[in-house]
């Protein structure tokens, strides 16, 4: 890892390479100027090799008068070492490490190998933000990151995290990324494409820097071949204009120019340069001992290598350009490269740097070597413990390739697939898995292969084969390990729910579990499962779901409740997604809240972004159904902050639920449309069903009953857990209003079966008001209100009063209806269900009474993030504590607080604590 950009002289006239770059320089100056004023930001310079990115980064560094500058340059040979680049960037400011809170300080120490433990990606990102903010306290900070396409994955994620969160800090970050490059963490940051120079600027650069007399024809050809690339304009004239025309890419031609210089060097110098190119550390303490082991005269060879202009030997070994390093390495014969890696392995300390030594040994070999494979396997384990999932995957993959023993090679390959999957390299994992498909696998290994295929398919968008592979694995295991087999059946359902593609999966699971293989699963050859293993006793959730499918809710609910409660621990400690769905299926808000609380507690303690996001989504939905839109909005803001921190896709369903209940047509419709597009792109039928339910609720609130009826029919069409049950009340109401009595009666029958079996006051109350809609019996409305008065589901309690009030008005009982319509309006408007509140107001107006106007809600005055901050601060949280939750700096939180105070017309945190409308 190079810790400083190479000297200007070694970069062949970087000042000259700034010819024609006024626009780019202007953007960089704007960035640093804003940082001086406390408004941080980032800029990613993208362009091909030699286009002048490094020159612009050097210009940024030199022009940042008064700034503290930290810098790092990525190395293609260190992309597997976790946090290597982040460590080098932070080394100059580690003196501020003691100013960080103890958990964050320890997180960085673990990431940088200064302490042992498992790294927490969230804390590392936040700790780095605090470290750089602390370093920028006295003067602004400039972070320069060159060759960012070669950053290790952990560092790239952390730096992208930083770049999105320095808006309130005096910190500027400038990156250089070579194109073409794979999609990466920096893609969403503000960027600038650095293109070739215009002809006039290219001619000026060529004339300024060329020491060779070129006639006009040669100059024109060089101009055409360089295509405005500054480095090419500086390198191509070295051939004197007599090189044949070259149709290859500009970077390739530049590499050839470097190789032409290499060819003029004596053999000893070429070998020394090869060793240097094979060592990514640039450490002379490794290069010179390695050279001496090959009996090289390092003084003579070093002088000759320096004379090529390709390299500079100082306190670090620096090539004049990354292309020069790759040109030297590629020019060497394979045997020379192996020799270079071999001597580097010999001089690398096996105690201080065992992983780099193992890697060099692997590159030095000519074939399989079990000793090296075992060493790489140990390196993979060390990398995994440091959170370097990418490094672990690379080490174990190489270990598999070097394994002589067939059994070990298969096991290491399967471990490598798992590691690649954990590292997010889904396509690579799938490709690697194909290498063992034709191997002599036993039945257990076949099952493991199917499990990995299933997990890969679940992670991929638009790949619906996940359940198929998981179920095939379960059937393979049915005779070998019946308990694991049942777990695999449930894993298929749990993963389908987590990724939002659960539509139809339960039917597949139950069919396969009952050895009634569905057509979908039988598309692949399945092994004979052998004799059916006895089901565990007491019945587990798989038995309960089978009973639900065959005999209905009345028969299955006792078993479902027993499975939810669990034996040693509740079911949600193992399968939270399935547990939350079943709690909602039973209309049991208390159990659903318990699931959400457990997810939040577990997510906070473990730092798992997946668990925490799932928990926040459940909290948001639970709060929405309780009518606490402030808490729902706050949970959504935190979930979105985590999604942004990890670069994950947005979770939709909790936002859909809130928009549907709130009842703002334009706002909700835009969200529904975006969610439907995302669901179509991902093949997420579960999300589509959520959109249909949300559309039904929205339109029942707006009294657009035909639209509500159409949406409710779509939501209930496939019989999905939870979504069918929760959509039935909407279907009953819309069908009654549209005069479709048979549809309403059928839906009521299904709703009644579900709610009577569940036996909760929430479910019984909702079914009762739906029954009142169908029968017109006043007692059903009274029963609904009696039940729902004991339920936490305020929106449904309010709707029961609304429906009863509407019925009473139509019965001509004006005085009686006003009480219920007034109650409905107060509950609905206080909670923020605007469409339903307007319905109640219209009904009141029809009785001759004007609904009392309500004051605006605090959450309407603030952004979701501001509301979240306000609610936390109102509980007494400090700026540091809020910053940790939102992965922002305390300075950013203070800036948000100033906006909150201004919008609410207050001046202190104490006044926030006194505001009852924050709902804390």
Image (cartoon, rainbow, N blue to C red):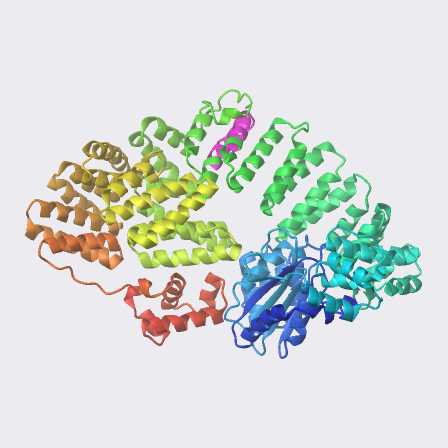
What residue is shown at x 26% (from left), y 64% (from top)? 856
Q: Which x, y percent locates residue 566? A: 40, 39
What residue is shown at x 17% (from left), y 55% (from top)? 841
Report the side of 462 relative to 815 (left or right): right
Q: Is 269 drawn above or below residue 711 in the view shown?
A: below
Report the side of 734 relative to 549 (left or right): left
Q: Main secondary structure of the magenta part?
A: helix
Q: Which x, y percent locates residue 513? A: 46, 27
- Please tell me whether residue 533 belongs to the stretch shown in magenta: no
What residue is shown at x 74% (from left), y 60% (from top)? 223
Q: Is 121 drawn above or below residue 872 in the view shown?
A: above
Q: Quadrant of the C terminus?
A: bottom left
The one of 669 and 17 positioned closer to us in this rendering: 17
* Total numbered labels placed on residues in the image: 0
Look at the image and tell me whether residue 476 can be seen: yes
Q: Quadrant of residue 201?
A: bottom right
As drawn, which residue projects farthest toward the front? 216
Magenta-colored span: 470-491
Report the side of 645 relative to 433 (left or right): left
Q: Quadrant of residue 826?
A: bottom left
What residue is shown at x 78% (from left), y 38% (from top)? 368
Q: Quadrant of residue 83?
A: bottom right
- Please tell me whether residue 487 belongs to the stretch shown in magenta: yes
The one of 69 and 542 positioned closer to us in this rendering: 69
Q: Is 831 drawn above or below residue 552 in the view shown?
A: below
Look at the image and tell me whether residue 622 can be seen: no
Q: Which x, y percent locates residue 510? A: 43, 28
Q: Quadrant of the N terminus?
A: bottom right
Report the side of 521 relative to 348 (left or right): left
Q: Which x, y percent locates residue 739? A: 18, 36
Q: Is 656 drawn above or below residue 916 in the view shown?
A: above
């Amino acid at each position: 890892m190079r810790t400083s950009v190479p000297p200007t002289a070694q970069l062949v006239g970087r000042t000259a390479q700034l010819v024609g770059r006024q626009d780019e320089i202007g953007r960089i100056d704007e960035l640093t100027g804003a940082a001086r004023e406390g408004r941080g930001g980032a800029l990613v310079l993208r362009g091909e090799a030699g286009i002048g990115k490094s020159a612009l980064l050097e210009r940024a560094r030199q022009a940042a008068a008064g700034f503290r500058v930290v810098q790092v340059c990525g190395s293609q040979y260190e992309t597997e070492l976790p946090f290597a680049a982040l460590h080098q960037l932070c080394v100059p400011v580690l003196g501020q490490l003691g100013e960080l809170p103890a958990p964050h300080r320890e997180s960085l120490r673990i990431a940088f190998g200064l302490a042992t433990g498992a790294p927490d990606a969230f804390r590392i990102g936040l700790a780095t933000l605090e470290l750089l903010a602390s370093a920028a306290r006295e003067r602004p900070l400039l972070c320069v990151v060159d060759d960012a396409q070669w950053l290790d994955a952990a560092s790239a994620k952390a730096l992208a995290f930083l770049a999105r969160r320095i808006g309130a800090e005096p910190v500027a970050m400038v990156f250089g990324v070579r194109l073409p490059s794979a999609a990466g963490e920096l893609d969403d940051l503000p960027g600038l494409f650095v293109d070739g120079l215009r002809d006039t600027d290219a001619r000026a650069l060529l004339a300024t820097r060329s020491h060779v007399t070129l006639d006009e024809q040669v100059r024109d050809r060089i101009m055409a071949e360089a295509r405005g690339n500054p480095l090419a304009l500086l390198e191509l004239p070295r051939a004197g204009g007599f090189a044949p025309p070259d149709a290859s890419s500009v970077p390739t031609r530049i590499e050839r120019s470097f190789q032409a210089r290499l060819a003029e060097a004596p053999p000893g110098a070429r070998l020394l340069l090869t060793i240097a190119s094979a060592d990514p550390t640039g450490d002379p303490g490794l290069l010179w001992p390695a050279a001496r082991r090959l009996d090289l005269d390092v003084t003579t060879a070093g002088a000759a290598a320096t004379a090529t202009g390709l390299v500079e030997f100082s306190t670090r070994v620096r090539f004049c350009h990354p292309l020069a390093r790759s040109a030297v390495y590629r020019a060497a014969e394979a045997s020379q490269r192996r020799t270079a890696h071999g001597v580097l392995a010999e001089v690398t300390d096996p105690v201080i740097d065992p992983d780099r030594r193992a890697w060099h040994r692997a590159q030095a070999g000519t074939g399989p070597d079990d000793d090296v494979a075992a060493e790489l396997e140990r390196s993979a384990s060390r990398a995994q413990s440091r959170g370097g999932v990418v490094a672990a995957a690379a080490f174990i993959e190489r270990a598999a390739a070097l394994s002589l023993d067939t059994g070990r090679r298969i096991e290491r390959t399967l471990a490598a697939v798992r590691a690649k999957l954990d590292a997010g390299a889904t396509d690579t994992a799938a490709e690697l898995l194909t290498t063992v498909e034709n191997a002599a696998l036993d039945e257990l290994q076949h099952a493991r292969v199917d499990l990995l295929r299933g997990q890969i398919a679940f992670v991929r968008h638009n790949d619906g084969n996940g359940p198929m592979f998981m179920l095939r694995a379960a059937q393979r295991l049915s005779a070998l390990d019946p308990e694991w087999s049942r777990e695999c059946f449930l894993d298929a359902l749990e993963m389908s729910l987590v990724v939002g593609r659960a539509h139809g999966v339960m039917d597949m699971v139950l069919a396969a579990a009952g050895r009634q293989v569905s057509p979908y699963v039988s598309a692949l050859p399945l092994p004979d499962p052998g004799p059916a293993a006895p089901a565990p006793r007491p019945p587990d959730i798989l038995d309960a779901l089978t009973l639900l499918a065959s005999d209905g809710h009345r028969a299955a609910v006792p078993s479902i409740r027993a499975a939810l409660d669990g034996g040693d621990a509740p079911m949600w400690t193992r399968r939270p997604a399935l547990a939350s769905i079943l709690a909602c299926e039973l209309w049991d808000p208390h159990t659903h809240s318990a699931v959400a609380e457990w997810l939040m507690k577990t997510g906070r303690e473990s730092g798992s972004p997946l668990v925490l996001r799932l928990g926040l989504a459940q909290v948001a939905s639970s709060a929405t159904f309780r009518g606490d839109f402030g808490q729902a909005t706050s949970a959504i803001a935190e979930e979105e902050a985590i999604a942004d921190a990890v670069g994950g896709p947005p979770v939709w369903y909790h936002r859909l639920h809130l928009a549907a209940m709130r009842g703002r047509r334009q706002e909700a419709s835009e969200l529904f449309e975006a969610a439907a597009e995302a669901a179509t792109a991902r093949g997420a039928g579960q999300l589509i069903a959520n959109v249909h339910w949300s559309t039904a609720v929205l339109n029942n609130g707006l009294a657009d009953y035909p639209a509500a009826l159409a949406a409710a029919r779509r939501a209930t069409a496939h019989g999905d857990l939870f979504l069918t049950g929760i959509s039935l009340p909407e279907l009953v109401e819309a069908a009654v209003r549209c005069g479709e009595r048979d549809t309403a009666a059928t839906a009521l029958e299904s709703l009644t079966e579900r709610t009577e079996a569940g036996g909760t006051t929430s479910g019984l109350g909702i079914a009762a008001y739906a029954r009142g809609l169908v029968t017109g019996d006043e007692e059903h409305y009274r029963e609904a209100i009696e039940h729902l008065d004991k339920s936490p589901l305020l929106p449904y309690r309010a709707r029961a009063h609304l429906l009863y009030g509407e019925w009473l008005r139509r019965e001509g009982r004006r005085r009686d209806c006003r009480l219920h319509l007034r109650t409905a309006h107060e509950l609905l408007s206080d909670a923020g269900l605007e469409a339903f509140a307007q319905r109640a107001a219209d009904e009141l107006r029809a009785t001759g009474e004007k609904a009392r106007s309500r004051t605006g809600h605090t959450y309407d005055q603030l952004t979701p993030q501001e509301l979240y901050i306000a609610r936390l601060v109102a509980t007494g949280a400090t700026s540091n504590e809020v910053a940790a939750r939102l992965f922002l700096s305390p300075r950013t939180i203070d800036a948000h607080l100033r906006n909150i105070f201004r919008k609410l017309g207050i001046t202190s945190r104490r006044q926030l604590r006194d505001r009852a409308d924050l709902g804390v």
